[in-house]
Image (spheres, helix red, strand yellow):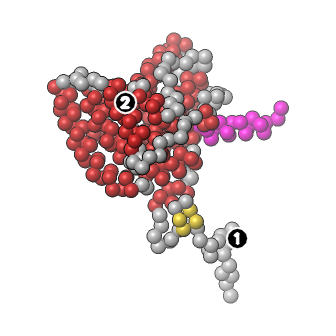
Amino acid sequence: MSDARPHPGTAHDEPIVHAFGVHDPADPDPWAALAMDRSLPFDPAAKAALLRDQRSPSRQFLLPLVRPLARLTIILAQVFKSIFPRFPHAPKFLHWMIATGMKRFLTPDANWLILRHFHLGSQILRFIADNVTPGFRPVLEPMDPKNVDGVRDNLFLKHDLNIYNFLIQLNHEMDRRGVTLQKAERLDFSAIDPDAVKIEEMPKGRLNKIDLQTAIEMYTPAYAFWLTDRDFWRAANSLQLDETIGLYCARLTGEEKHLAMVTNAHPLVPESTLKAGFRLMLHGLSTEVLHGFLVELKQRQAAAAAAAPA
């Protein structure tokens, strides 16, 4: 007789309980599979917040209605801007409108993820500067909002300006020093600090129901209309700089494999601005994954140093 006993370590008779209920093999939950998947280096709290937000009724039912209307509005805004490229130009009003909408209508998870994104992006840029040009730090606008009101200070616009200014200043300093981008013998991870991300509790009113992706689709046409044509084009195409930043980190760390996580394509071939909302979601994902990857490398380097003989 054959031995039909299960392999040691398996639990065929025990139900699999996940974050969204009990696993049903005949009807598996796609979000549960993504929650349990470990293919990406992702902060657990951030991943849980993203999944809760993505599986909300707002994203399921409101987003399909909002997206085509938002893209049509972007087309109309850009037709208008082809005639009046610098009018209107009201970044303060735009950011007041965004902050007000975030505070009153966005889910707590969506707001938290938005504010967290600015902190992570700043840490990644500082990490690159610390390792490519030690002692030199490009002059950038601070990106450490503690609450939704921090958005009012033209935060989104400054975020876009920062990335371009960073690349220009960093490469100018590299030229001045005569250095090239290459693997560092020992990396300085002092800029990568998940515990330094300090964000206050987010609003939890009765109307805070709109998910992150739907909100981004709503805000993108406003971005196209209330900024100059040049500002909007620059902001939309800054999303593709994810690949540039990913390449910098790959060269520094010698870990080319993580480039598979960068999904916004190279900025030398700009995408259409119509997809800016969707690519902004990819931008947020790329930042989370790249930061998570650097956190893992920091832990790995610290463990290796602790295990090395004195």
Residue 306 in the magenta stretch? The answer is yes
Foreground residue, 252 or 67?
Answer: 67
Visible in this render: residue 154? yes
Visible in this render: residue 240? no
- The picture places residue 161, in percent across and down from the top left corner, at 40, 24
Name the amino acid, label 2: His
Name the mark on residue 95. Answer: 2
Q: Which residue is mark 1?
A: 8
Q: Which residues are magenta?
A: 294-310
Label 2–label 1 contact, CB within 8 A: no
Taking the spot 62% from the left edge, 41% from the top edge, the residue there is 296
- The picture places residue 280, in percent across and down from the top left corner, at 39, 39
Which numbered mark, 2 or 1, is in the foreground of this view? 2
Does residue 117 lie above or below 26 as drawn? above
Does residue 30 lie above or below 114 as drawn? below
**Hey, which residue is sitting farthest front in the picture?**
206
Labels 2 and 1: the sequence-earlier one? 1
Does residue 48 lie above or below 310 as drawn? below
Question: How many badges with numbers are in the image?
Answer: 2
Category of crowding for the residue at label 2, using alpha-carbon neighbours closer than 10 angstroms: few (below 14), some (14–19), many (at least 20) = many
- The picture places residue 291, in percent across and down from the top left corner, at 55, 37
In the rendered view, does 182 fall on the left or right side of 230?
right
Residue 53 in the magenta stretch? The answer is no
Residue 279 occupies quadrant:
top left
Name the amino acid, label 1: Pro
**Hey, which residue is sitting farthest bottom in the picture?**
1
C-alpha distance separating marks 2 and 1: 57 Å
- The picture places residue 226, in percent across and down from the top left corner, at 28, 29
